[in-house]
Image: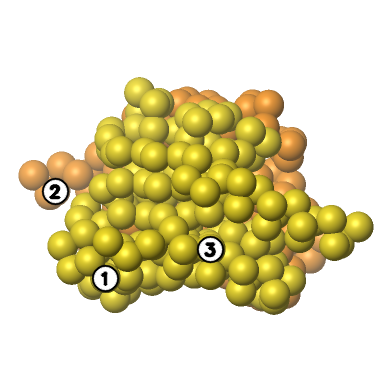
Chain colours: A yellow, B orange
């Protein structure tokens, strides 16, 4: 199996080189075993506070596949999704979520509102967190250290 | 003061005529007293599960103003925002939120995860819910009744 988290890290690193907080995401079609959406954080570039990597990758995948539900797709992202992105993942009916570092300050999956555990969230998906989490933590730490 | 909720309802009704769940939103710049973002739900038209009226109105306002933070802007929407949109509102630093009907099934402001009350949500804003709520409830009820 290709290392899709590696692809997410490549998108994160490219975002960091553009001056964005280095977070990256890819959407993979499980049947095709192909990346159908790929994005880094573009908040600064777009001047759009909602332009998180996951949102852009999901929108890209929906555009590529021509469908709003991504039930056969998995999302790989270098940081635990925030509540906005977690709810977007639920709306898009993503099959599995793989993420690297946990985010106690801003995450919405294992932290904060724990979106997928809300009684009003009807989409159930498999979540795997902590994959290469040190690499993600270092990437973010180096980015913020260089800005100080 | 212009009736901005009326403008949000106009966007909601237009969305309904396009076959979308009839929800509409406008972003108003409080200093300019002008609408800088306006959208109806476009989930079906775009084939994008995240294309809620609030998301599109916020993105439109950021594009128009050329800034990611909308600290001088207020959002008017015909239904209580879901958790995704509530978090987007917080990220965009919207000043005030006015919404019509409460949404016990899918809302994220006064229901569900109550995004703005989460300790991890650092943006504080004024929220006013229940404005013309019967009109919003009827609009949604008629839409779903016609589809059965």
Q: Residue at x 55, y 30 (%)?
A: A111
Location of residue B134 (image quadrant): top left
Q: Disc 3 versus disc 2: distance between alpha carbons?
A: 47 Å
Whole-percent x, y for residue B29 in the image: 73, 61
Location of residue B11 (image quadrant): bottom left
Report helix, strand or loop for mark 1: strand
Observer-nearest residue: B111 or A124?
A124
Q: Say which mark, if any, is on residue A9.
A: 3
Residues packed near mark 3 inside 10 Å, few (<14), some (14 to 19) or many (20 plus): many
Query: Of the residues tagged 3 and 2, which is closer to the observer?
Result: 3
Determine whether label 3 and label 2 are within 8 Å by CB: no
Residues packed near mark 1 inside 10 Å, few (<14), some (14 to 19) or many (20 plus): some
Residues packed near mark 2 inside 10 Å, few (<14), some (14 to 19) or many (20 plus): few
Above-or-below relation of B6 to A11: above
Determine if residue B78 is in view: no
Residue for badge 1: A34
Location of residue B40 (image quadrant): bottom left
Observer-nearest residue: B29 or B61?
B61
Report helix, strand or loop for mark 2: helix
Residue for badge 2: B146
Whole-percent x, y for residue A39 in the image: 49, 69
Locate residue B114 relative to residue A120 in the image: left or right: right
Determine if residue A90 is in view: yes
Observer-nearest residue: A45 or B8?
A45
Q: Which quadrant of the rendered structure holds the C terminus of chain B? A: top left
Q: Residue at x 14, y 48 (%)?
A: B146
Q: Chain of mark 3?
A: A
Question: Reading the chain from its start, which is encountered first: label 3 or label 1?
Answer: 3
Q: Disc 3 versus disc 1: distance between alpha carbons?
A: 17 Å
Locate residue A133 relative to residue B119 in the image: left or right: left
Q: Chain of mark 1?
A: A
Report helix, strand or loop for mark 3: helix
């Amino acid at each position: 199996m290709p290392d899709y988290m590696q692809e997410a890290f490549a998108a994160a690193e490219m975002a960091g080189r553009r001056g964005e907080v280095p977070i990256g995401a890819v959407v993979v079609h499980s049947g095709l075993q192909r990346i159908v959406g790929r994005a880094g954080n573009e908040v600064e570039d777009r001047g759009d506070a909602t332009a998180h990597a996951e949102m852009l990758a999901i929108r890209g995948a929906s555009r590529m596949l021509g469908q709003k539900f991504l039930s056969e797709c998995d999302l790989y992202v270098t940081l635990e999704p925030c509540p906005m992105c977690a709810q977007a993942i639920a709306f898009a009916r993503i099959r599995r979520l793989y993420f690297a570092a946990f985010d106690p300050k801003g995450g919405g999956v294992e932290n904060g509102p724990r979106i997928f555990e809300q009684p009003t969230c009807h989409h159930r998906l498999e979540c795997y967190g902590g994959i290469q989490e040190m690499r993600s933590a270092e990437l973010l730490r180096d980015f913020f250290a260089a800005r100080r």
